[in-house]
Amino acid sequence: MKKPNLTLYLVTDDSYFQDRDLVSTIESAIRGGITALQYRFKKKPARQMYEELLVLRELTRRHGVDLVVNDRVDLALAVEADGVHVGQEDLPPDVVRKLVGESMYIGYSVNSVEKLKEVEHLPIDYIGFGSIYETTTKQNYKLVGLEGLRQAVKLTTKPIVAIGGITHYRVQEVLGAGAKGIAVVSAILGFEDVERATRSLVEAIKGYYRKAIHEGTLSA
């Protein structure tokens, strides 16, 4: 099974693709430096999603970017994605693992510190945790905050990818709280110049690690 590379993890959303081409937008984000792409759409027919995913699978594979499919295990299997991401209302992770075997990694969404205690035993490879800050991308979200993130990191052995309202100027405090990756939607897709927005995040991530290594809080 491929080891996840979720350092900068772009999640798609229906609202940002009303008047924007999907593939060229993702190409711009890849040029900017994303390490993973989560294909997440709620309003498209299965056939359309499959055809888009085939194109994105070829594109991400060519550039060494992970492709993760949200919710739809069938589509993830059909296009040989690197990972599949599920939440508490989707198929349970143990069922997903039976379906995908060791062919892909599994991510799981958790939105409270209390829930973390229930998921440590699950066959998942990373946890999507948030919302860290206020966000406009999701309507019904729970705000866990930076302190919640710090607690979460101490409660699980699984890598945590932080999500929710993260912008380039918040990257350092999120990584400093122990997140292993940053998942974003509007911090990239909310800008016309997607490549430039992505580069800003990449620079912030690199800046954090340079500083941490220099200060001795992280080994090179």
Image (cartoon, helix red, strand yellow):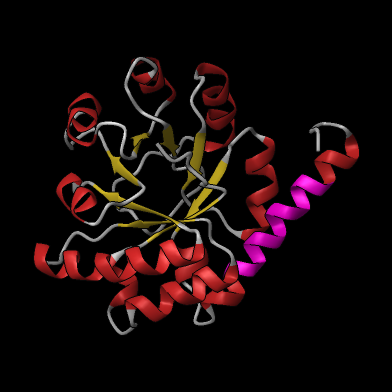
Q: Is residue 211 left or right of residue 120?
A: right
Where residue 212 appears, as percent x and y from the top left, is: 81, 40
Query: Residue 201 colored magenta?
Result: yes
Q: Residue at x 15, y 64 (%)?
A: 43
Locate the C terminus by quadrant.
top right
Q: Is residue 67 left or right of residue 3?
A: left
Classified by dominant secondary structure, the portion drawn in magenta counts as helix
Looking at the picture, tell me which residue is in the foreground, 15 or 107: 107
Compared with 63, 127 (above or below) is above
Where residue 170 appears, as percent x and y from the top left, is: 64, 52
Where residue 174 appears, as percent x and y from the top left, is: 62, 42
Q: Residue at x 66, y 67 (%)?
A: 200
Where residue 68 appears, as percent x and y from the top left, is: 35, 51
Locate the N terminus by quadrant.
top left
Where are the magenta residues, as a range? Answer: 198-210
Q: Quadrant of residue 135?
A: bottom left
Looking at the picture, tell me which residue is in the foreground, 180 or 62: 62
Query: Residue 74 colored magenta?
Result: no
Q: Which residue is drawn at 36% across and 77% down?
A: 23
Q: Is residue 115 left or right of residue 165?
A: left
Q: Residue at x 27, y 52 (%)?
A: 80
Compared with 65, 163 (above or below) is above
Q: Is residue 207 left or right of residue 60?
A: right
